[in-house]
Amino acid sequence: MEVGIDKIKHYANVFGLGQVTKIDLPHEISGVIPDREWKQKNLKKEWLLGDTPNASIGQGFVTVTPLQLLHYINVIANKGILVRPSLVQKIVDNASSEDTSKANTSHRARILPSIRKRIDLQPKTFELLQAGMIQNVQGENGTGKQANSKIVSVAGKTGTTQVVSLRTRERLQKEKGEIEEKYLNHAWFVGYAPAYAPEISTVVLIEHGQSSTKAAKLVRKIVDFYFTNISSYQLQRLNIS
């Protein structure tokens, strides 16, 4: 409440929320980080005091894409460096055969230039954010404990998207005795690993998954697979194109 919606929106935008990432894909949408002007323009209503805390935790009028959320957490993992995401069409070994090289030449992928910029925040701010991500997975009371791997340390955050309001859920429960799957919450987890020297980040969204624990478990499986099958040493020997 003390920060206010204007600063919340400003820094959300700085981290890439509410804006397209400009990944090399068509039809990307920007999502919404609302403020007074947005609400007046789109809903013809004044901004209310309660709208601010709602927006601050990603509820209310806030919408984001999985890619945006991954883009956001990458800034935290990189300690303030924002990198435009890009697709990888294939991974080619430098030691590939002549025939493979010819094939690669004839089907060369379009490479977008890497665009990086540093977010102007104090290092201690990113240290605090990283500490929170680590505690959420590795702390005794963390909601993301199911994402923790036995292979590497993981940092990240659980999330829940309400499909219908709590009042509506209660009414449906009372009327039908159970809630249909289409009304169940969406489950999120976004994270990176290793926690102290990030190499990989991942986001999982399970539509109507209800519990973010399910998403956290899938992230752990992804991390385990990556560090079991693709080490940083192996990546250094590959030419990504």
Image (cartoon, helix red, strand yellow):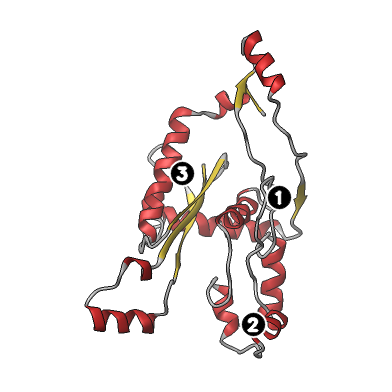
Question: Which mark sits nearer the N-terminus, 2 or 1?
Answer: 2
Residue annotated with mark 1: 81
**Lower sequence index among marks 1 and 3:** 1
What residue is at 62 percent from the left and 14 percent from the top? 100
Residue type, mark 2 in image: Glu
The residue tagged with tag 2: helix, strand or loop? loop
Kind of residue at disc 1: Ile
Residue drawn at (54%, 56%) of the image: 131
Image quadrant of residue 86? top right
Q: Residues within 10 Å of mark 3 (few under 14, many from 20)?
A: some
Figure check: 114 above or below 45: above
Marks 3 and 2: CB-CB under 8 Å? no
> In 3D space, how far apart are the residues under numbered discs 2 and 1 (Cα atoms)?
27 Å
Q: Quadrant of the C terminus?
A: top right
For disc 3, the marked residue is 153
- Residue 160 location, x and y as percent? 44, 66
- Residue 134 image offset from top left, x and y in percent: 49, 53
